[in-house]
Image (cartoon, rainbow, N blue to C red):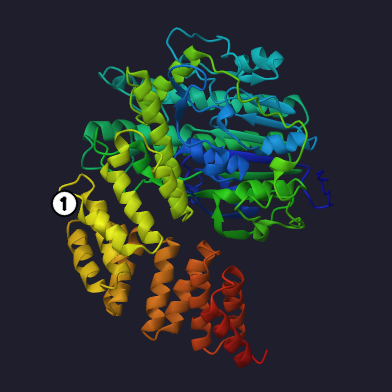
């Protein structure tokens, strides 16, 4: 099978994809009005933007490979931070060889297009694509590496430009006071304090600056069709400094707060400056996309920062940013319901190539101007030709792998490897299987999740967490009694007692006992279990007929997370049942804008329009519902009734 590139007058000459790991509109918006991020403000004014929903689990190596390939984790195969070494003892960081399917740059290589890829997560060793690649393992990893040290073997393609890329690498000692003071104004005094974080700040700034310098050098060095550059700085700054962001958390000492309170604003402003340089180098004929894989809790929902209280992933908010501008992208547009799975289909379309049927994301056509979606090919995996992927047996240098592992341990993402090699390998495989299970739960593949759970080999197989997930899968498959039996067998003093109580409430609801679910969830809510429990309580109250209480519970949940489409859709349904179609329509339209592929939301919107006598609009909403759920007989009947009422 061959694929031809489509060229149109209004299509961009090339595409630049800029990844800001963990960037969040909640942090950005307050910086735009006072002019603290002028580059992004001007970029937004001439393009389209909106929220970007992530997928579960919210782990960077999984997410960035889904973004790059448009495929789910069970297809691309990157399931965590580490994996067993394929042909020897030990474990290693996930590598470019871990990905089982083609990424954007592989597809473009097949089509004769040139790509630059810099710093992308799990891109080491660099792939031999048409163009150039610098992997994500190029930062300085030890005090023994001084300025000018060569880059790790295999980190650059083509190899002959490795020395040139090494010249772009910024050493932490080159981050002087002029760079540090905007982040830590009293850095001189802070350096005198034991345990200060100024050295860590210098290291992170150097890493971000290195990626940026390499990207600019490649963009100006040769002509290109696609450039993807990944900045990890905001995420790593978040893990190091978000606990000090205003307002002060009660667990944070006053002196630490005063020392580092400017760091998060500083890293966003730094990225704004870097974006300015990228845009100037890209030129006006380039379509530019700026996005993040997830957000980062920065307000009252920040978790307890004290050691051992929470893990790094607990800080990740499930909504990132998405913004685009340039040729082929609509000016002044709003993006609604976008997901990280939509990036590859949309980027391919901007480059005049079709997405594939095995990519679950959609083309963001509402953001495009003069660029049409093309008929999908069955799969890019079946398109023959050299694509620049490594053979599966390519090995990673053991010392490089050990250095990268130490960094992951230091960040708290993984535990230090066990001295027992076989146990370490087994535990790593089990950990990745559990990540895959979480991904399957996100996609509601309950049968697949149960199959993977059955493959667990270590202690996690019979853990409380695995048992809870089995029960959740059984509930998803409609086997509520079997789920309840599993839950009843679990000890009530389990470390997972909150999750256990939530699932017991869900099982009670599924078995037609909403009053029991309400009682259990009210107890959890009184114990401060969080807004997610309040949303569950709203569902239980609605099922019990306590509609006013349900609306109040949904309101509390939305106060904590105003852009939750599930809660907005439930609120719309409750308002409709309470005889408030106008209120239902308001909540339903907000829900639909955030999750366009949910037929339940479209049904509620259609019913609200019909109740208000706006039958033509009801037809549009109900038709969307039926298109997404063609076997839903109730929706089909209501669509026909709406058409008759509209005279259609």
Q: Quadrant of the N terminus?
A: top right
Of residues 15 and 605, the one nearer the viewer is 605
Assign a secondary structure to mark 1.
loop
Compared to residue 642, the image places residue 151 above or below, namely: above
Question: Which residue shows up at 47% across the image and 47% down it?
Answer: 28
Residue 275 horizontal/vertical position (percent): 59, 37
Left or right: residue 415 compared with residue 586: left
Residue 572 horizontal/vertical position (percent): 42, 75
Question: Which residue shows up at 54% across the image and 30% down it?
Answer: 122
Residue 491 horizontal/vertical position (percent): 17, 49
- Give the residue furthest to the left: 493
Left or right: residue 147 compared with residue 569: right
Residue 60 seen by the camera: yes
Compared to residue 512, the image places residue 114 above or below, namely: above
Of residues 316 and 341, the one nearer the viewer is 341
Residue 246 horizontal/vertical position (percent): 32, 43
Residue that badge 1 annotates? 492
Q: Quadrant of the C terminus?
A: bottom right
């Amino acid at each position: 099978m061959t694929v031809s590139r489509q060229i149109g007058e209004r299509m961009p000459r090339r595409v630049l994809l800029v990844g800001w790991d963990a960037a969040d509109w909640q942090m950005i918006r307050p910086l735009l009005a006072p002019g603290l991020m002028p580059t992004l403000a001007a970029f937004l004014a001439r393009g389209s933007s909106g929220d970007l929903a992530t997928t579960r689990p919210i782990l960077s190596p999984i997410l960035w490979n889904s973004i790059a390939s448009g495929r789910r984790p069970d297809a691309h195969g990157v399931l965590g931070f580490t994996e067993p070494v394929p042909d020897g003892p030990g474990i290693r960081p996930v590598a470019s060889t871990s990905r089982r399917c083609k990424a954007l740059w592989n597809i473009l290589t097949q089509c004769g297009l040139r790509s630059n890829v810099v710093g992308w997560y799990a891109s080491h060793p660099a792939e031999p694509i048409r163009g150039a690649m610098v992997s994500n393992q190029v930062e300085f990893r030890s005090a023994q590496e001084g300025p000018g040290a060569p880059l790790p073997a295999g980190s650059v393609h083509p190899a002959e430009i490795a020395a040139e890329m090494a010249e772009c690498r910024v050493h932490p000692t080159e981050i002087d006071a002029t760079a540090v003071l905007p982040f830590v104004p009293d850095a001189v005094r802070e350096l005198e304090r034991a345990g200060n974080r100024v050295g860590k700040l210098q290291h992170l700034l150097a890493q971000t600056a290195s990626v940026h310098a390499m990207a600019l050098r490649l963009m100006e060095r040769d002509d290109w069709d696609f450039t993807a550059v990944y900045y990890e700085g905001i995420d790593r700054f978040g893990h190091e400094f978000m606990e000090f962001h205003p307002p002060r958390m009660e667990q944070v000492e006053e002196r630490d707060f005063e020392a580092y309170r400017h760091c998060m604003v500083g890293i966003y402003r730094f990225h704004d400056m870097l974006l300015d340089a990228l845009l100037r180098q890209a030129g006006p004929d380039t379509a530019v996309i700026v996005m993040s894989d997830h957000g980062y809790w920065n307000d009252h929902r920040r978790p307890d920062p004290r050691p051992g209280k929470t893990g790094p992933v607990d800080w990740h908010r499930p909504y990132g940013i998405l913004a685009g501008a340039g040729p082929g992208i609509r000016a002044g547009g709003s993006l609604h319901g976008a997901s990280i799975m939509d990036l590859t289909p949309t980027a391919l379309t901007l480059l005049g190539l079709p997405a594939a049927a095995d990519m679950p994301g959609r083309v963001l056509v509402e953001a495009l101007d003069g660029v049409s979606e093309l008929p999908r090919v069955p799969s890019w995996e079946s398109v023959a030709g050299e694509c620049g992927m490594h053979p599966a047996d390519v090995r990673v240098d053991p010392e490089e792998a050990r250095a990268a592992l130490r960094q992951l341990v230091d960040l708290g993402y993984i535990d230090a490897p066990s001295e027992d090699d076989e146990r370490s390998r087994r535990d790593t495989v089990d950990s990745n299987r559990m990540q895959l299970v979480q991904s399957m739960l996100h996609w509601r593949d309950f049968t697949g999740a149960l199959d993977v759970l059955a493959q667990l080999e270590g202690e996690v197989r019979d853990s409380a967490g695995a048992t809870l997930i089995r029960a959740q899968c059984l509930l998803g498959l409609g086997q509520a009694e079997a789920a309840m039996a599993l839950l009843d067998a679990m000890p009530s003093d389990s470390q997972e007692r909150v999750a256990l109580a939530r699932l017991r409430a869900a099982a009670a609801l599924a078995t037609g006992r909403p009053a029991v679910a309400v009682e259990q969830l009210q107890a959890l809510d009184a114990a401060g279990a969080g807004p997610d429990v309040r949303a569950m309580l709203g569902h239980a109250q609605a099922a019990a007929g306590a509609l006013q209480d349900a609306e109040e519970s949904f309101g509390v949940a939305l106060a904590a997370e105003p852009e939750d489409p599930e809660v907005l859709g439930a609120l719309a349904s409750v308002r409709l049942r309470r005889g408030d179609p106008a209120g239902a329509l308001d909540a339903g339209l907000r829900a639909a804008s955030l999750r366009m592929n949910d037929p339940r939301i479209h049904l509620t919107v259609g019913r609200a329009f019909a109740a208000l006598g706006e039958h033509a609009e009801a037809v549009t909403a109900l038709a969307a519902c039926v298109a997404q759920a063609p076997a839903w007989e109730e929706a089909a009947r209501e669509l026909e009734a709406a058409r008759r009422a509209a005279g259609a």
